[in-house]
Image (tube, rainbow, N blue to C red):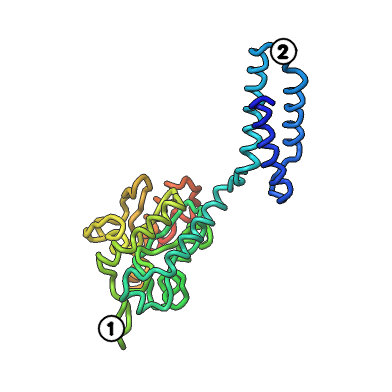
Amino acid sequence: MSSFTQGLDILLQQLRSLDMANRPRFDQSLIDRIKGLKIEDVEEMPSRTSDSVEADYGSSVDAVREDARRVLAPEEPELAPSADREQRMAALREEVLVCIKCAHLAAFRHTVVFGVGNPSADLMFVGEAPGADEDLQGEPFVGRAGELLTRIIETMGFQRGDVYIANVLKCRPDMPKGSSGNRQPTPEEMQTCLPYLRAQIDIIKPKVMVALGGVAMRGLFGTSEPMKLLRGRWHSFGNIPVMATFHPSYLLRNQALTEKRKVWEDMLQVLERLQVPITQRQRNFFLSKA
């Protein structure tokens, strides 16, 4: 018996064991093909030259090896990009929900505020940190500032679920017992939490990002420039263009229509960058009231 036939016998034994174990994607025709090669090995070898036998065996062995590789190590089905992003985001979320890197924040929070929206979104909004409402509900921008952000998103022609919304900090900054309101996150807290935001951005790969307020800009870029100098301008986070604009809470404190118009002008730039058609009504929003 030739060494080639012996090799086929060993492979047949392995494949039969897979067949008995009902291994997924097992192909019974593979055994039949190998049996055929064995018969050919016994019956035809004497009448053929060594060169032709070697060439035929070489191609046959390659084919058998490839079929065996597919049976022994079947390839996983390729995921659609959207499904892959959803799975990666879900895995990241599970990691973030149990984070205790900032022990004082972990002890103070009710829940981690991971982020919400479409993991395949073209547009991503980044805020600074959760407030009291967000901390209780586990979702960013659900208080009064969140309601205003939702109206801005809808006026742009999107639904809240079309975009992705996240914060630099995933936990509400701790406050002294008995005090109300919110404090800004410290640079150390933002640096500790920033890898999670970077991971979210890497999964989503948005075409455009909007940084809401000076704290978000500090978290993303480390800049301490005032927002009046940062807003309305494009910045780059890696290869992603970022529009800096006022935080919705600023507009709640400052009700001047001129300030609202500034934010809306920033959003018009975002729509243009996304190459989204802009209606005349959108262009004139706030204009006649200013």
Identify the element where label 1 is drawn: loop
- Closer to us: 88 or 156: 88
Left or right of residue 131: residue 63: right
Q: Amino acid at mark 1?
A: Pro
**Left or right, 199 with reference to 213:** right
Q: Quadrant of residue 47?
A: top right
Mark 1 vs mark 2: in front: 2
- Residue under label 1: 176
Q: Is residue 110 above or below residue 259?
A: below
Label 1 and label 2: CA atoms lie apart by 91 Å
Q: Is disc 2 surrounded by few (<14), some (14 to 19) or many (20+) residues within 10 Å?
A: few
Q: Up-down: is 52 above or below 146?
A: above
Residue at 46% in and 60% down: 92
The N terminus - image quarter: top right
Residue 87 - label: none
Count of labels in the image: 2
Asked whether disc 1 touches disc 2, contact meaning CB atoms under 8 Å apart, the reply is no
Decide if residue 258 is in sight here: no
Question: Circle 2 sits in a helix, a strand or a loop, which is it?
Answer: loop
Q: Position of residue 152 (x, y in %)?
A: 45, 63
Nearest the eye: 54 or 141:
54
- Counting other residues with Cα less than 10 Å from the Cα at mark 1, is it few (<14), some (14-19), or many (20 or more)? few
The residue closer to the viewer here, 157 or 170, is 170
Relative image position of residue 266 (x, y in whole percent): 37, 55
| Amino acid of disc 2 | Arg
Say which of 37 and 152 sits in front: 37
User: Which badge, 1 or 2, comes first in the chain's sequence?
Assistant: 2
| Quadrant showing the C terminus | bottom left
Q: Image point 41% across, 61% down: which residue?
A: 286
Would you name the residue on which mark 2 appears? 48
